[in-house]
Amino acid sequence: MENAASQADSLASFTIPIIMLLIFGIVAHMLAKEKGRNVVLWTVLGFIPVINVFCMWFFVGAANLRLEKKIDQLLEKTQK
């Protein structure tokens, strides 16, 4: 009986961190796509524990490269 309880506890102790890593990885993937960044790089960084927290802080404040390119194109057209 103790063995089954021990296995359930060890499974639960791994399940929560894995779910958290999945959430961080998926959010990093979505943000990288939205902001025009390297999707593969930022997705991998989203799955690395501790680093993923710092990456999320960066992404929240990072500029949207897609929008910057569009604005630059509009400015070029209006200046001509």
Image (cartoon, grey):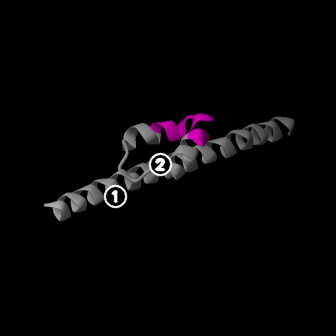
Residue in view at x 53 percent, y 52 percent: 60
Q: Secondary structure of the magenta portion, mostly?
A: helix
Q: Quadrant of the N terminus?
A: top right
Q: Residue type at mark 2: give it.
A: Ala
Q: Is residue 47 magenta?
A: yes
The front one of 51 and 78 is 78
Return the residue at label 1. 67
View extreme (bottom): residue: 78
Q: Give the amino acid at mark 1.
A: Leu
- 30 w.r.t. 42: above or below: below
Residue at image coords 54%, 41%: 55
Q: Tell me residue 68's x, y (percent).
A: 33, 54
Magenta region, residue range = 44-54
Q: Residue at x 47, y 48 (%)?
A: 62
Residue 39 location (% of width, % of height):
38, 44
Task: For mark 1, give the secondary structure.
Answer: helix
Q: CA distance from mark 1 to mark 2?
A: 12 Å
Q: Return the residue nearer the eye: 59 or 11.
A: 59
Q: Nearer the viewer, residue 62 or 1?
A: 62
